[in-house]
Amino acid sequence: MGKDTFYITTPIYYVNDKPHIGHAYTTILADVLARFHRLLGDPTFFMTGTDEHGQKVEKAAAEKGIPPQQQADETVIRFQELWQKLDITFDRFIRTTMPFHKKVVQEALQDLYDRGLIYKAEYEGWYCVPDERFCTERDLVDGKCPDCGREVTRIVESNYFFKMSQFQDWLIDYIKSHPEFIQPAFRANETLGFLKKPLNDLCISRPKSRLSWGIELPFDRDYVCYVWFDALINYISGVGYRQDDEQFKKWWPASYHLIGKDILTTHTVYWPTMLKAMNLEMPKTIFAHGWWLIGKDKMSKSRGNVVNPMDMAEKYGVDAFRYFLLAEMTMGNDASFSEDAFILRYNSDLANDLGNLLSRVLKMTLRNGGTVPQPGEYSAEENELFAALHNAISATESSIKEMRLETGIAAILEAVRAGNRYLEKTAPWTLLKQGNTEKLNTVLYVCAELLRNVSVLLYPVMPEKMGDLREAIGLERELDVNIRDLTRGGNVMTGKVMKDREPLFMRIMVEKENAQPKAAKAKVKEEKKVEEAPLISIDKFFKTKLKTAKVLTAEKVPDSTKLLRLEIDLGGETRQIVSGIAEHYTPESLIGKTIVVVANLAPAKIRGVDSYGMLLAAKSGKTLRLVTLDGDVPPGVQVG
Ligand code: MSP
C-alpha cells in the first residue's frame, strides 16, 4: 500500500440515548492511536460522529413526543460535550443527517441501482424490530433473532435489495489472503464461519409507511434507506468521496475501523461487499474490541448498571479514566469494569509508582539547587535503568503496530518502577548528606531523563497530566519530539529548572461508609496494635505538624452521609479538608470553631474531593468530639 497516512474511525453512535463507557472506550482508543501516529509524524485523520437515522432514533423520539431531528440535535450534544471533556482530538465529527452525507448516500444508491446491483423484490419473512434486521427461517435461533435473542415479527412487503450474494466468494478469498483485514484473527474466523452459509442479498430499504426517519431512496420516494447502508457510507463521505477527489485519495483506504465485537457482521460482510460493488478499495484493518462488562454482567439500562463516563471523568479526572480504560483492557477481549478496580489501579500505578517517582525526583533536585545537573560516568545500575527505558520505548512502538496498547503501557510502568527501585538503591538523599556530588548528579540526571521519556510515551494516553509533569521537570508542556527520536535524544535535560508542585495524582482514599463486620474487626485489631506501639522520640513526634485552624465554611459532601468538606484558615492560608464527622456535627455548628489539624499530611482524594489535612478528634463508642482549645488562640499556631 505504501501510504504513510493514518486514517482512523470509530463507529458512529446512535443518538437514541446518552453515551456510555463502551462509546467512551472506542473513542479514547481511537484518540490515543491518532495521537501516537501524529507523534510518529504520520499525517493523521481521525473521524467520529453520530448515526442519526433509523428505528432506534425514531422510537426514542416518539417516546418523548418530539421529532426525530430534535432527538438527534439534543443527544448529539451529549456526545460532543463528552468528547470535549475527555480531550478527544477528532479531525471531523460527522452526523448522518448532514446534507452532504445524505447526498453522497443517494448518489451511491442511484449508481448501484443504475448498474443493476440494487433490485426490487417481494420479501416475506422474519424481521427483528430492535435490530432492524431481516432473518431467514434458518437464521433464527429457537425462533428468535440470532443477534439479540428477541422476538421476531412476520412481515410481507416489497423492498429493494443489494446483490450482496454475488460477492460471497470474492469476500472469502479476500479475508483469507489478507490476514490484517479483520483483527484480532479469531474475529476473521468468526466472519469466515458466517460466510460458510450462502449469503443472502441485503435488504436496503424500508417502506415509509413503516419507518419514515431515513434517507429517501432517489429512485423510489416511498422508501427510505436501511440505516446500516446509510451509516457505513459515513466512512467515505466524511473524507471527500464524491465531493473532493484529492482529499478522498489522500485518506482512503482507512487504516483502521475500530468497532465493538457486536457489529462485526455489518463491518466485515456488508461494508466490504458494498465497497467492492462501488469499486473502492478495502480498509486496511477492521479491528473489533471486546466489551466492557460490569463485574461479570452485561451492561444494560434494565440492569441499572450503565457506567456514565462523564461521572467517572468528573470524579477521578479525565486522564486517570483514559489511562484505566486502556491499561485494563486486553485489546480484543472483554474486560470487567468496577470502581474498586479503578481505584486499585489508580492508586498503585498512578499515585504510587508514577506520582512518587516524580515527587521524589522533584524534591531531591530542588534540595540540590533545582537545576538538572550534568551526569558523571554511568555504572551498571544506570545501564540497567536505561535498558528498562529502551524496552518501554520499543514495547510502545510495537504495541501500536500490534494493537496491544496495554502491553506498551505495562512496559512504561515497568520502567517507572525500575526508576523507583533505582532511587532506593542509589539513595540520593544519602549521597547529598555524604557530599558525593558526582554520583548524586548522575542519579538526578538519569531520573530526569527517565521522566522526560515517560512524559512522551504516556502523552497520548494522559495529555494533560503529562503536560503537568513536563512543566514540573522544566520542559514545555507540548511535545517537541518524534517518538522514534527518543532513543537518540542526546542530553536534553541538563540545565532544566524543576518546579515544585502538588502530587500529580492524589491518592484516592476509600471511605469505609459501608464497612463490613470483617473490616470493623480489623480496625479493633489495629487499635490494639496502636496501644502496644513502641515509644517514640520527641523528634519523631514533631515531624507531625499540628496547628490550630479556624473553620471558615462547612458543607456536606454530596452522596455521603459521613463526610463534611471544610474550609479552614491556617493563619493566612486557606485550605480545604474533608472529614468524616457529619454524623456528629452539623456544618453550621462548626463555623467559627478553632480546631487542631495535622498540617503536613500528604494530600488525598476522598470521595472525589481533595483533602489537604486532617482534623483531630477523639472517638469513644458512638461519640466523637473534636479537639479544641481551652481559650482564644489565633489560627496557624503550632500545637505540641
Ligand atoms: N450506530 C451503530 C454503528 C454504526 S457504524 C457505521 C451502533 N451504534 S451504538 O451506539 O449502538 O454502538 C456503538 C459501539 O458501542 C459499538 O461498537 C458497540 O460495540 C459499542 N459498545 C456497546 N456496548 C459496549 C460495551 N459494554 N463495551 C464496549 N463497547 C460496547 O452500533
Image: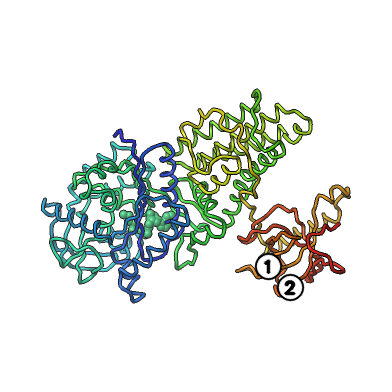
Q: Nearer the viewer, residue 182 or 12?
A: 12
Q: Where 595 sits versus 367, above or below? A: below
Judged left or right of residue 321, residue 523 is right
> Which label is found at residue 564?
1
Q: Residue at x 71, y 36 (%)?
A: 368
Disc 2 residue type (three-letter) = Tyr
Mark-to-mark CA distance, 1 and 2 = 9 Å
Quadrant of res 41: top left
Say which quadrant the N terminus sits in.
top left
Question: Three-letter amino acid code at disc 1?
Answer: Leu
> Which labelled disc corresponds to residue 124?
none
Q: Nearer the viewer, residue 127 or 280?
A: 280
Residue drawn where x is 80% and y is 69% of the image = 625
Residue 495 in the image: x percent, y percent?
61, 33
CB of mark 1 near ligand 1 (< 8 Å): no
Badge 1 vs badge 2, beta-carbon distance below 8 Å: yes
In the image, is residue 377 above or below residue 288?
A: above
Location of ligand 1 given as a quarter of the image = bottom left
Mark nearer the N terminus (1 vs 2): 1
- Image coordinates for residue 152, horizontal then vertical, percent: 29, 66
- Numbered marks: total: 2
Q: Which residue is mark 2?
A: 585
**Callout 2 environment at 10 Å: few (<14), some (14 to 19), or many (20+)?**
some
Percent coordinates x, y for residue 295 in the rendering: 53, 57
Q: Nearer the viewer, residue 583 or 245?
A: 245
User: Of helix, strand and loop, which one carries label 2?
Assistant: loop
Q: Secondary structure at mark 1?
A: strand
Instruction: Write down the quadrant of residue 189 in the picture.
Output: top left
In the displayed structure image, the side of residue 148 where residue 85 appears, left or right? right
